[in-house]
Image: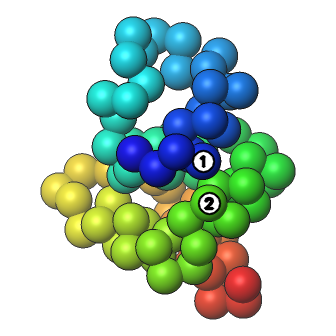
């Protein structure tokens, strides 16, 4: 996990209250939670940490999984966000 991401997640630990070790989460799991439950400021901050190419790569990996918790409206929003960023 990237150092900046690790530092940022430490400030937002309450989102992952049920996870004992935040460092054990994959980038895909973190991004999925950001898209599902965080706000616009968090999403922009993560976008800055990962940059566009890396963000898109992680997002594509998330979508290519057998199962994802993202809804169509969230997927559409992120697709537009990436396209216009």
Q: Quadrant of residue 78?
A: bottom right
User: Outermost residue toward the bottom?
Assistant: 83
Between the residue at mark 2 and the residue at mark 1, the CA separation in whole angstroms equals: 7 Å
Up-down relation of residue 53 to residue 47 (above or below): below
Q: Would residue 6 be found to the left or right of residue 80 on screen?
A: left
Mark count: 2
Q: What residue appears at the point 33 percent right and 60 percent down from the top-left corner?
A: 62
> Image point 71% across, 26% down: which residue?
11
Most foreground residue, 74 or 32: 32
Q: Position of residue 67 (x, y in %)?
A: 24, 51
Q: Position of residue 72 (x, y in %)?
A: 51, 64
Judged from this view, the residue extending furthest toward the right is: 41
Badge 1 crowding class, 10 Å Cα cut-off, few under 14, some 14 to 19, many 20 or more, is: few
Pointers 2 and 1 in contact (C-beta within 8 Å): yes
What residue is rendered at 66% in x and 38% in y? Answer: 8
- The N terminus: image quadrant: top left
Q: Position of residue 22 (x, y in %)?
A: 43, 25
Is residue 2 something that shows in the picture?
yes
Query: How many residues crowd mark 2 within 10 Å: few (<14), some (14–19), many (20+)?
Result: some
Q: Residue at x 38, y 65 (%)?
A: 58
User: Residue 3 placed where, x, y %?
Assistant: 52, 45
Q: Nearer the viewer, residue 76 or 61?
A: 61
| Quadrant into which the C terminus falls | bottom right
- Residue tagged by mark 1? 4
Q: Tell me which colouring the rendered structure shows.
A: rainbow
Q: Is residue 32 visible?
A: no
Q: Secondary structure at mark 2?
A: helix
Q: Which residue is mark 2?
A: 49
**Label annotation for residue 73:** none
Q: Where is residue 10, by image quadrant?
A: top right
Instruction: Give the structural element (helix, strand or loop) at label 1.
Output: helix
Mark 2 / mark 1, whichever is N-terminal: 1
């Amino acid at each position: 996990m990237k150092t900046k991401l690790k530092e940022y997640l430490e400030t937002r630990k309450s989102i992952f209250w049920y996870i004992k070790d935040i460092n054990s989460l994959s980038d895909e799991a973190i991004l999925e939670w950001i898209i599902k439950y965080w706000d616009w400021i968090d999403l922009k901050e993560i976008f800055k940490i990962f940059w566009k190419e890396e963000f898109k790569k992680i997002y594509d990996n998330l979508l290519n999984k057998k199962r994802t918790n993202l809804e169509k409206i969230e997927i559409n929003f992120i697709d537009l966000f990436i396209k216009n960023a």
